[in-house]
Image: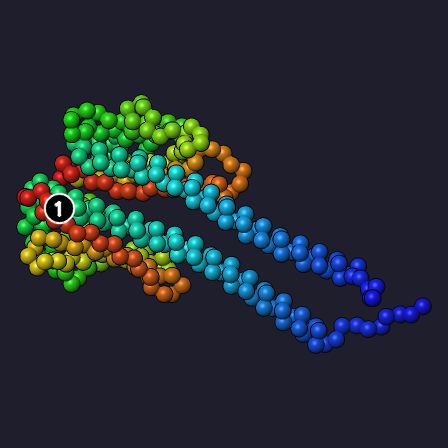
Amino acid sequence: MTNKGFTLIELVLVIAILGVSIGVTTDVLISVIRGYNKTQVMNEIEQQANFVSMKIEKELRSAKDITTPATSGQSGTTLVFINDDNETITYSLTGDILQRNGDAVTSSQQPSGVKVACGSPNCFELKGTTPQIVRITLVFTQASPSPLKVFQGDISIDSTIVLRSTY
Amino acid sequence: MIKNRKGIGLLEVIAALGITAVVLTSLVSLSVFVLRSSLRGKLLLEGTKISNREIELVRAYRDQPEVSWQAFVGSLSGHNCGSVHCHMSPNGTEILSELVIRDGGTPQEISYGFLYEDLLGAGEIIRISVEVSWKDAGVTKSTRIYTDFTNWQQK
């Protein structure tokens, strides 16, 4: 019968190797879970951004006249236009909420709310007058604050719309 | 007292240096790759924005009340947009038959234009493909977005 056991060095080595492999596995697992969460967050923001951009684009294409911004090259956080039913529609960015005629279009309430900010140069820019061309640049970020960078994300929309009836 | 006078052999030092060099090189190339990818992503996004704007201008040009479908198609063929890249004037009022080159001669050079294709040969379905090209580390990259237009308003 042999009485030889493991030496201390062997034991320490085995523990070290085990530690490293467990560490690597945990790291991979965590990054997969974080990636999944990040995708969820980005999907949520993208849905809101798409909804807002489609809504504004649809209304603007059939609008009759833009009153604010008034001159070509001018930009601001407010967009005022006359729609095809001759109603005055105002889109404005108040704080981090986009409003349409005073009613919020986006919500910054958690958990799925978004904050809206202007892109560069500004939210609504009039690029031309005959026809009227508007460039909309908005940046959407998730409203729920997170200390971890993987749970943060932003989606920016940059679209140019020509008012069909202003040729 | 017994002193351990054994040092590290030359072979060991060379092996250690070799391993360090391999690790460092792979780390540097990984970071260069990440930076390149991020730049590529940014440029692709910019290219997509330009394409979308150009398509919106063409669509608005087609939609104007006083321009008939025949006039729209005639304007495209009149400007030879089937073989020469065309672009919309920035104010959206006319088609110009030339490629736009922005920041020409600089590393930030971006060029764009669109071509049209009569899909059925009968002027019923017109494909507009916008092509945006830029230089990335000396290599020309491009993106192409196309949309098919029809005379859905029967004008």
Q: Secondary structure at mark 1?
A: helix
| Depicted B123 relative to depicted A50: above or below | below
Percent of width and height locating residue B59: 17, 46
Q: Residues within 10 Å of mark 1 (few under 14, many from 20)?
A: many
User: Residue A164, located in which quarter of the rendered image?
Assistant: top left
Q: Nearer the viewer, residue B75 or A70?
A: B75
Q: Is residue B96 visible?
A: no
Residue furthest front in the image? A1
Image quadrant holding the C terminus of chain A, namely: top left
Residue drawn at the location 21% of the way across and 49% of the way down: B55
Q: Is residue A122 left or right of residue A35?
A: left
Give the amino acid at mark 1.
Arg
Mark 1 belongs to chain: B
Percent of width and height locating residue B6: 82, 73
User: Residue A165, located in which quarter of the rendered image?
Assistant: top left
User: Residue A69, located in which quarter of the rendered image?
Assistant: top left
Residue furthest top in the image? A102
Residue behind mark 1: B62
| Depicted A128 relative to depicted B97: above or below | above
Q: Is residue B81 left or right of residue A26?
A: left
Percent of width and height locating residue A91: 29, 29
Residue drawn at the location 71% of the way across and 73% of the way down: B12
Q: Nearer the viewer, residue A71 or B39?
A: B39
Which scheme is used to colour this image of the protein? rainbow
Q: Is residue A15 visible?
A: yes
Q: Is residue A24 left or right of residue A5?
A: left
